[in-house]
Image (cartoon, grey):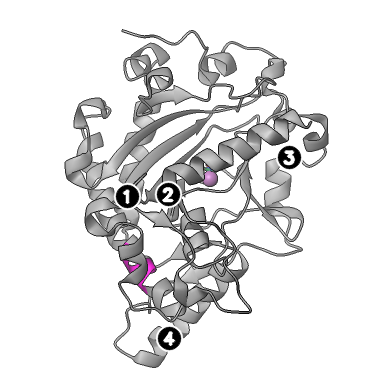
Amino acid sequence: MVTSVLPRVESLASSGIQSIPKEYIRPQEELTSIGNVFEEEKKEEGPQVPTIDLTEIESEDKEVRERCRQELKKAAMEWGVMHLVNHGISEELMDRVRKVGQKFFELPVEEKEKYANDQSSGNVQGYGSKLANNASGQLEWEDYFFHLIFPEDKRDLSIWPKIPSEYTEVTSEYARQLRGLASKILSALSICLGLEEGRLEKEVGGVEELLLQLKINYYPKCPQPELALGVEAHTDISALTFILHNMVPGLQLFYQGKWVTAKCVPNSIIMHIGDTIEILSNGKFKSILHRGLVNKEKVRISWAVFCEPPKDKIILKPLPETVSETEPPLFPPRTFAQHIEHKLFRKTQDNMSN
Ligand code: OGA
Ligand code: NI
């Protein structure tokens, strides 16, 4: 069995250190923008992440339905991220998802190590922490559990947490319901682009090929939260991402040149438009830059579900309907795998020129 030589961030956090290892300290330029997340969350001035009420998204009344879609469209075009409310997934199910994930993370690190992934052999599913991917050795203040949850025939249930025993049942039910929500959103976004209702869903792989991957992000308390990030600034590569969290603030969005802290909205699911939909829509829908702060007082946990197209089967490029003489294609054709490769390459270039 392969065990990691890296300490888990959780072990580091519980060791009683007062200052964090240098690998977790952000570069000087970035430190100036990192504040106390509880103070940041309280701020009422300035732009705020929109909240979209989905109650009427499938209303019988055409006008009512259209009004709801327009709200979604505006949020997707201006922000590319929003709090979804009345999304149809029950509070009870969301609570159970949070409970089983939290229970798993409450196990001793040695227990969780039994599920450790092995990134060097390409085995990304399981329990893990970020490996440094460049010379600076920069790390993030989080551990995670990552696994594919939909379609059901592509799951590897043997690597799913066995404790708590309800984990599989609860997570499977959440996956099924989220898949339904993803379809509803993709339909609405298609119509917003003047496409046929089923078009975006088909373009990202349809029922058979669109993959839902769950990443439970576990952000331990950090003794020097103003020096670290839980997750560094990035855009999601997915088509859509759906996020639940344990009501501890942390997520920040880079909007109009400033970091905006997402408020904790009860019973909401945060939804991101990812790079995939940004590309297909020729930039009409935005994939927003975001990051996660950590804090001294409370463990933060988030459940991010990435809805992704298959790696090699589909070539992603602006749909012809989104391109015109005045709106030339903003993205070259790439498979999802090539898109990931391109982002990594760009990042390596950035690091070399620093
Ligand atoms: C991610 C992410 C933010 C959060 O996992 O891609 O952006 O709130 N997470 O944990
Ligand atoms: Ni993200």
Residue holding disc 4: 66
> Does the closest atom of ligand 1 sit within 8 Å of the Cβ of label 3?
no
Q: Which image quarter is the C terminus in?
A: top right
Mark 4 or 2, nearer chain start: 4
Answer left or right for 295 relative to 154.
Answer: right
Give the numbered dot on residue 36. Answer: 3
Q: CA distance from mark 4 to mark 3?
A: 40 Å
Question: Which residue is tagged 2?
Answer: 335
In terms of depth relative to the viewer, which is nearer, 311 or 13?
311
Q: Which mark is residue 313?
A: 1
Q: Is there any visible trace of residue 26 in the rendered image?
A: yes
Callout 1: 10 Å neighbours few (<14), some, many (20+)?
few
The extreme left residue here reads 153
Amino acid type at circle 3 is: Asn
Question: First in sequence: mark 4 or mark 3?
Answer: 3
Sort mark 2 into few (<14), some (14-19) or many (20+) by Cα contacts within 10 Å: some
Q: CA distance from mark 4 to mark 1?
A: 33 Å
